[in-house]
């Protein structure tokens, strides 16, 4: 264990899940908590030095600063383990993905109050952020008589009436994000203003591809960058106990963190996956055509098959960028996520079309890659073929006049669309899509567009019934799973 406590490596620095676990285990075995002292070397670079009796001065990982909250919580746990103080782990997850059952949270909070003690600060913040949506009214009733700022914030997080605010910004920000992750909380923003995105004001995202240049050794190099902007604008720094804000601090470069740390980061705020996916989209968008890939990037695509994962705008963007990736592992995971989302009803023929259309008209995406992925997905079932066909049609409609200068390999998508029209006995019904196809002339794309426009509709009642049955079965299975979980 000691080998991890040298130089700039070590526990409780917001850098490594492995090192934090080692720090807790060492504290449990030896009764000592090893913490770091921060210092600058002769070059002015920030370093960390460990000494058993030093007080901790926290270092923050520049790539994933939100991990600092988890490291602080690990240190709180290590200190209790060293002192042999057994107490409820307020924020310990009860379900996969980092979710915390509100009833379990209420019982743990009651036990702390019965002891006449307050839970550690970071443990309390993470507990609020991990609250699951189930059983909140019952949990609210259990803690209705508790006193103190944490109890007030917990009742707010669980949906209770908004009480008078205390002084601890981190608790009220966490409560606001737990209460409604995607909504603004004007009262929190007024009481604790301008803390950054996903504090009192929910984060909003804008993205684009930008042409940039870089001069080196007398030469100018031109390249395209994927840019993601977050509003409200993040401050230069944020407190370690505001992990929802720190999740929106995007890395300065495109190298990905290890997979374990990305998964660990997802457990900070399970309901805030949009912020987590925004980080993944930033990395995937700048790694589309590389001959090699950062292997951690694939981790952002792993949760997509989960039927309980809402596909917000950033999740859809990450999915579409994964479908566009050159690296086989990325587009294979994205294809698995797309197939699962079609089966359970999260993706219909319209859900991905706006994002796909923006990518298609950016000029930075190769439609041939999409065609290869969509072919495999469409062959899974008649439902998948139906949704893929509608997605392609609606993507053309959304692209509109912006597709006046189509990509060279657009014909691959149009040929797939023609094949799916023939299989399903359908024709292009969207007038906007027909207008786009009529404007395509010359070359393989123009030839394929004419064939698509000429496709005639053929009624097939049996096939329509089969598609409807598959769609209903997927939704029933999803509801059955929810019912079993509740019981």
Image (spheres, helix red, strand yellow):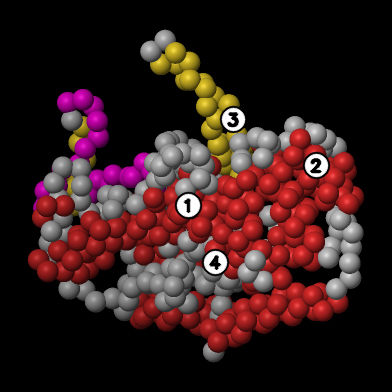
Instruction: Say what secondary structure mark 2 lies in.
Output: helix
Q: Is residue 334 left or right of residue 382?
A: left
> Which residue lies under the disc numbered 1?
328
The residue shown at (75%, 54%) is: 417
Q: Which residues are magenta?
A: 42-64
Which residue extends farthest bottom?
487
The correct choice, above or below, for 168 with respect to 157 in the image is above
Instruction: Find disc 2 in the rendering and name its residue.
Output: 447
Measuring 24% from the left and 46% from the top, which residue is drawn there? 57
Quarter of the image with the N terminus is: bottom left
Does the stretch in magenta take in 62?
Answer: yes
From the image, tell me which residue sits under label 4. Answer: 305
Q: Main secondary structure of the magenta part?
A: loop
Q: CA gap, disc 2 to disc 1?
A: 30 Å
Q: Nearer the viewer, residue 88 or 311?
A: 311
The reply to whether the C-beta atoms of the residues labelled 4 and 2 are less than 8 Å apart is no
């Amino acid at each position: 264990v000691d080998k991890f406590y040298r130089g700039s490596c070590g526990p409780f620095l917001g850098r490594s899940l492995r090192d934090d676990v080692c720090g807790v285990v060492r504290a449990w075995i030896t009764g000592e908590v090893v913490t770091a002292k921060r210092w600058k070397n002769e070059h002015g670079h920030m370093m960390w030095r460990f000494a058993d009796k030093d007080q901790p001065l926290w270092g923050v990982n520049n790539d994933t600063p939100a991990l600092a909250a988890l490291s602080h919580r690990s240190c709180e746990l290590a200190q209790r383990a060293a002192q042999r103080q057994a107490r409820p782990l307020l924020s310990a997850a009860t379900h996969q993905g980092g979710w915390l059952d509100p009833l379990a949270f209420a019982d743990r909070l009651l036990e702390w109050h019965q002891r006449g003690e307050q839970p550690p600060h970071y443990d309390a913040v993470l507990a609020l952020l991990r609250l699951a949506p189930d059983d909140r009214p019952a949990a609210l009733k259990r803690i209705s008589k508790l006193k103190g700022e944490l109890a007030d914030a917990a009742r707010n997080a669980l949906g209770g009436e908004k009480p008078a605010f205390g002084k601890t910004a981190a608790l009220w920000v966490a409560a606001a994000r737990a209460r409604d992750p995607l909504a603004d909380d004007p009262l929190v923003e007024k009481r604790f203003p301008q803390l950054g995105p996903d504090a009192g004001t929910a984060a909003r995202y804008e993205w684009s591809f930008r042409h940039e240049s870089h001069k080196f050794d007398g030469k100018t190099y031109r390249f395209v960058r994927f840019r993601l902007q977050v509003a409200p604008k993040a401050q230069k720094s944020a407190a370690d106990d505001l992990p929802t804000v720190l999740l929106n601090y995007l890395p300065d470069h495109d190298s990905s963190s290890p997979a374990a740390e990305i998964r660990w980061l997802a457990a900070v705020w399970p309901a805030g996956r949009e912020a987590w996916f925004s980080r993944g989209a930033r990395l995937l968008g700048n790694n589309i055509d590389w001959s090699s890939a950062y292997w951690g990037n694939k981790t952002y695509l792993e949760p997509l098959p989960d039927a309980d994962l809402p596909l917000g705008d950033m999740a859809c963007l990450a999915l579409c960028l994964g479908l566009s990736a050159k690296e086989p592992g990325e587009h294979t995971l994205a294809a698995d996520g797309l197939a699962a989302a079609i089966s359970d009803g999260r993706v219909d023929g319209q859900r991905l079309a706006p994002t796909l259309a923006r990518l298609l008209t950016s000029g930075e995406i190769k439609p041939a890659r999409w065609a290869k992925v969509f072919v495999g997905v469409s062959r899974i079932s008649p439902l998948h073929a139906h949704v893929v066909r509608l997605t392609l049609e609606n993507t053309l409609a959304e692209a509109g006049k912006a597709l006046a200068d189509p990509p060279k390999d657009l014909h691959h998508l149009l040929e797939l669309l023609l094949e799916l029209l023939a299989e399903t006995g359908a024709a292009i019904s969207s007038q906007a899509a027909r207008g786009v196809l009529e404007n395509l002339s010359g070359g393989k794309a123009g030839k394929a567009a004419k064939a698509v426009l000429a496709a005639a509709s053929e009624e097939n009642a049996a096939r329509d019934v089969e598609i409807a049955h598959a769609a209903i079965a997927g939704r029933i299975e999803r509801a059955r799973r929810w019912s079993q979980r509740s019981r």
